[in-house]
Image (cartoon, grey):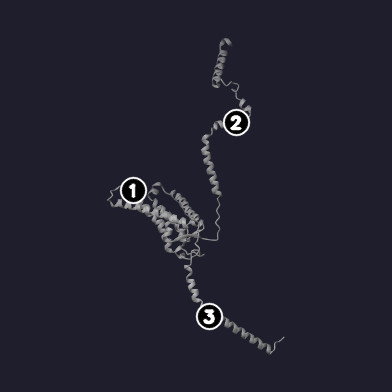
Amino acid sequence: MIPNDSNKDNLLTDSVATASLNSSNAAFWKNDWLNVQSSLSSLRNSLASFPSSPLRIMRVSQLDADLLDSELFGTFKEQLWLLFSPQIKQTFEPELLAILHFIYRLTVLESGATYGAQLQNLKYRNEKQHWGGLQSITKDSPLTTFQKFAYIAMTVGGQYIWIRISRLVIAQGWSELSEDDPRNIFWKVLQKVENIYKTVSLLNFLIFLYDGKYSTLTDRILSIRLVYARRIMNRQVSFEFLNRQLVWHAFTEFLLFIMPLINLRKLKNLLKRKLLPESYFRSNLLDFLPTHICAICHENQSASNASAVISSKAEPGNV
């Protein structure tokens, strides 16, 4: 059915009215949006100052990561020592350990985590970018180039320098010099620095046990923290192997304790009497002897009697 002119006029009027209504609503929405822009901007800027829920990382996972790194490094070191003679190892041990340690820590430059941390689903992040209300955000800030190289310099270079200086001081006997000697004073300063470092490391570890951040002093100085690489991954812990090892260890200790208290010879004879038939014991030629006669004396007497009989038969008069 073809619409007439009146219907066309009505449709045109409705479309014009709808367009005007939409334009008026759009104008109203735009005005409100422009009015709240300043409030939204100030609210967005103040979000960083709002307190957020702290990010909880399991302390045992971080300690296990350090333990795994130590075990892996020890395995690599044992393989390295097989390539060199004892003389070379004794002379260049600090340099060889520094090179191996540097190679092992290169994973921090590439992936931002050590091998042990990766096995525990952990990685390092730049904690400076997560201060305030940004601790629990899903996106972690990666380490800066300075933090990566400073981490390697402190963990590898610092340890190498300390070992070399300590070996030099001990080899030349600076501690046995006079108290006015500068070398003896330098040795005392080294001792104080070592004590201070141990004390600060202990305090840092106690703080780590309290808040779960910065397991080492190097991490705290550089503001790098171990966090979960994938937070949605469930932590599955199996104690089957540990339980088996504990059972075998306890069983071994029990055997080592009880074995000296057991008379094995007596136990063996008892088992023979209980398990073997009586004919086994009666098969012996000396079982007929009474208990008051010595078996050795009886054997000697029998041998002497037999020899006497043989000699008497061998005489000419008895042939």
Give percent across and percent down for residue 155.
41, 56
What residue is drawn where x is 33% and y is 48%? 171
Q: Amino acid at mark 3?
A: Asn
Q: Is residue 158 left or right of residue 43?
A: left
Compared with residue 219, is residue 311 higher up or lower down, i.e. above or below? Answer: above
Task: Tell me whether the residue at label 1 lies in contact with that at label 3, contact meaning CB atoms closer than 8 angstroms.
Answer: no
Q: Amino acid at mark 2?
A: Lys
Image quadrant holding the N terminus, namely: bottom right
Q: Earlier in the sequence, mark 1 or mark 2?
A: 1
- Residue under circle 2? 272
Per the image, label 1 sits on a secondary structure element best described as: helix
Compared with residue 82, is residue 302 higher up or lower down, i.e. above or below? Answer: above
Q: Nearer the viewer, residue 290 or 58?
A: 58
Q: Earlier in the sequence, mark 2 or mark 3?
A: 3
Q: Using the rendered view, name the quadrant where residue 16 is placed.
A: bottom right
Q: Which tag is nearer the camera, tag 2 or tag 3?
A: 3
Packing grade of label 1 (10 A; few <14, some 14-19, many >=20) is few
- Residue under circle 3? 31
What residue is drawn where x is 49% and y is 74%? 41
